[in-house]
Image (tube, rainbow, N blue to C red):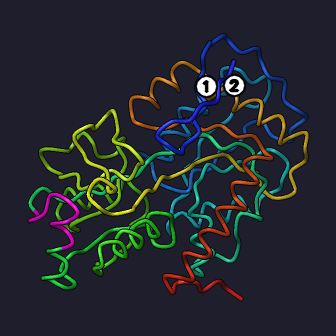
Amino acid sequence: MLERRHLAGSIVAIVATAIVPAAATAAPDLPCSTVRVVVPFGAGGGSDFQARLLVDAANRIVDGPQLQVVNITGQSGNRGTREVANADPDGCTLLYHHAGILSSYLTGRAPFTWEAFTPVAMIAGEPSLFAANASENYSNLEELAAYGEENPGAITAAVSIGSDSHFFMLQLQDALGVRFNIVGYDGTAERVTALLSGVIQITQVTEQTAAQYFGNQLTPLAFAGEERSDRVPDVPTAKEQGYDVVLSTTRGFLLPAGASDEVTDYYDGVFEAAVQDETVTAEFDKRGIVIDYRGPEAYRDWWQEAFERWKALAIDLEIYTPRQ
């Protein structure tokens, strides 16, 4: 049984109140022996971790073709995303992604937006963290803002260009009133590696990818949730520090546009069961990932609302340059 409840002020979480073994879910007649689940980023990042955990859980309950995660990297996620957008909507190709689909379209890096896909299931939100290399001369947002004001252009911030991390960093620098030297990396794992090596000074990370380095190699600057995280309780929120910055990476499964209701509903049932798996809920909780399951209709509404909100933000930040 699933119980919906409010968590951390405004995030609606869905948690399993009673975990029971799920019956095998019979697949419709799919024209493939293996279903590809495309993650448009490299191994080791947040999207890859979540997708593999969920696919493993799904494969324990499906009665039909098994699912397999495939990493198709490049172009800040756009290469793999484009491949799914161009795939047949026959149920043999899925995408696990976040709102980077929107930012890539709004900044002109991709010619398609969320309407190139059939939303299947929103899975979870992961509040962002901003972190710096431990050798830097700032340990919170106020010190970062002061350093950036005194040293224009000296802070190199890594993002995945055109992805949600790009929009998150733009919102942070706008709130701080400074300008960073923004450079691009392909996914969270690459950004964290660059931060650890000192090639960059700050980036947006997640608890799963970076918390293990806090206090030694990395300095957490702010948690971008409504409230502090139970996993890193010593990290103050941006709002506590006087900056209205609340940001979360929301991920879910999508099919190519044109997928039938039969196929969409099948995967909705599979992932609703998978997200209740004890291993999934335990691993998500350990990493501060907030389960927020929404089926096809609610997920479609989320994409439409997010698109309008992000479009307004892109116009306000003067980066709205969609392809004509």
- The answer to whether residue 174 is above or below residue 267 is below
Q: Residues within 10 Å of mark 1 (few under 14, many from 20)?
A: many
Read off the residue under disc 1: 57
| Kind of residue at badge 1 | Ala
Instruction: From the viewer's side, name the closer residue of 70 and 227.
Output: 227
Quarter assignment of residue 177: bottom left
Q: Nearer the viewer, mark 1 or mark 2?
A: 2
Q: Residue placed at 70% from the left, 42% from the top? A: 121
Side of 20 where 295 appears, left or right: right
The magenta segment is 136-145
Q: Is residue 144 one of those drawn in magenta? A: yes
Q: Is residue 101 above or below residue 24?
A: below
The residue identified by callout 2 is 273
Mark 1–mark 2 contact, CB under 8 Å? Answer: yes
Q: Give whichever of 94, 146 is nearer the camera.
A: 146
Res. 49 mark: none
Tell me the residue at 28%/38% (across/down).
232
Question: Which quarter of the picture shows residue 261?
Answer: top right
| Quarter that holds the C terminus | bottom right
**Image location (x, y in percent) of residue 38:** 62, 50
Q: Position of residue 285 (x, y in %)?
A: 44, 29
